[in-house]
Amino acid sequence: MKRELNITVNGESYNLFIEPKTLLVQVLREMLGLTGTHQACDSSSCAACTVIVDGKAVKSCSILALQVEGKKVTTVEGLADGPNLHPIQQAFIDNWAFQCGFCTSGQIMAAKALLDENPNPTREQIQMQMDGHLCRCTGYNMINEAIQDAAKRLKSREAAMKLPAQKNLQSKWTQTAKSGKGA
């Protein structure tokens, strides 16, 4: 007998009716068409299916979809801002942190969860977070370097977002000073 599932994925709400034994990865891929989340091992040992559920990295092949009732799920498709890749995605590209790309979305999502919690992780903390993410093609050093690079990019982006507010204050002050009003 199907049960109702209310879930928010990448900021969009869904109301679905699913079998109780349906896995989260199946809902994402088969019902919502979000195929960036890959299903590989079916035993939660490769982590290619990693998504973020309420801020935590979760292997979507090891959790029933009904367990995320009312929660917020983010997949790799939810990171980019239109045509602009998320800094973590771009760092993986720029640092050659993938080859075939099959496991990359899970690694990116685990990296995002880590950097959201710890914006300045050490190499050891990155390795601990990425433990269990299996990749048959590339070197883990490049993945680690990509995550370190992503942390720097996110800090730069955050700093840049603060700049316009300062420019506006300076601009208003300059206009007031030129007009002779105020002060």
Image (cartoon, rainbow, N blue to C red):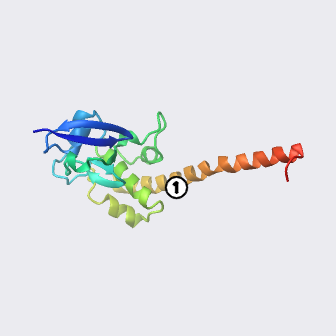
Q: Which residue lies furthest to the right in this view?
A: 180
**Residue closer to the observer: 153 or 10:** 10
Residue type, numbered disc 1: Lys
Looking at the picture, how far across and down is residue 127, in whole percent? 35, 62
Which residue shows up at 73% across the image and 49% down it?
169
Q: Is residue 159 left or right of residue 147?
A: right
Looking at the picture, how far across and down is residue 141, in whole percent? 38, 57
**Residue closer to the observer: 103 or 168:** 168
Looking at the picture, how far across and down is residue 59, in whole percent? 25, 51
Q: Which residue lies furthest to the left in this view?
A: 1
Which residue shows up at 20% across the image and 51% down it?
63
Question: Which of the image's four quarters has the N terminus?
Answer: top left
Is residue 146 at least partly visible in the picture? yes
Which residue shows up at 47% across the image and 52% down it?
150
Is residue 143 at least partly visible in the picture? no
Q: In which quarter of the image is residue 2?
A: top left
Q: In which quarter of the image is residue 99?
A: top left
Looking at the picture, how far across and down is residue 42, in whole percent? 16, 47
Number of numbered tags placed on the structure image: 1
Q: Is residue 24 above or below residue 143?
A: above
Q: How crowded is mark 1: few (under 14 residues within 10 Å), some or many (20 or more)?
A: some
Q: What element carries label 1?
A: helix
Q: Is residue 13 left or right of residue 61?
A: right
Label 1 sits on residue? 152
